[in-house]
């Protein structure tokens, strides 16, 4: 599923960034993948995905 339409970033890509690259918050995700740097509409969903992965770990 696409989370960030602007940059074509999927939920899988976000999960991978969290699990493999140690991304722990939106600021780090922006640096890593660029999510949220265009229109910003994906920020809330991306944040939710990050939070849920971290809670599951
Ligand atoms: Fe992610 Fe626009 S949908 S910046």
Image (cartoon, grey):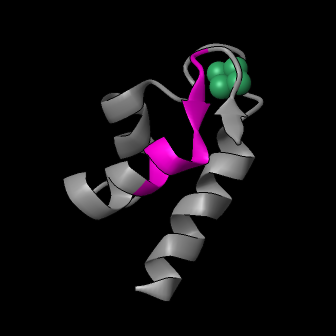
In the rendered image, residue 46, in percent from the top left (x then y), is placed at 62, 48
Height in image: 8 above or below 42?
above
In the rendered image, residue 52, in percent from the top left (x then y), is placed at 59, 74
In depth, the one of 17 and 37 nearer the eye is 17
In the rendered image, residue 10, in percent from the top left (x then y), is placed at 58, 38
Height in image: 36 above or below 46?
above
Instruction: Say which residue appears at 51% left-offset and 84% top-offset.
Output: 55
In the rendered structure, the answer to whether residue 51 lies left or right of residue 2 reads left
Instruction: Say which residue appears at 36% left-offset and 52% top-offset.
Output: 16
Q: Quadrant of the N terminus?
A: top right
In the rendered image, residue 26, in percent from the top left (x then y), is placed at 48, 47
In depth, the one of 24 and 21 nearer the eye is 21
Q: Quadrant of the C terminus?
A: bottom left
Which region of the structure is painted magenta? 7-15
Instruction: Say which residue appears at 71% left-offset and 21% top-offset.
Output: 5
Height in image: 24 above or below 45?
below
Q: Which residue lies furthest to the right in this view?
A: 41
Determine the quadrant in which ligand 1 lies.
top right
Q: Does the magenta stretch include residue 10?
A: yes
Instruction: Say which residue appears at 50% left-offset and 86% top-offset.
Output: 56
């Amino acid at each position: 599923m696409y989370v960030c339409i602007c940059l074509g970033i999927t939920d899988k890509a976000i999960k991978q960034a969290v699990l493999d690259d140690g991304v722990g918050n939106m600021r780090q995700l922006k640096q890593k993948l660029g999510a949220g740097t265009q229109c910003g509409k994906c920020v809330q969903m991306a944040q939710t995905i990050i939070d849920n992965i971290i809670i599951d770990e």
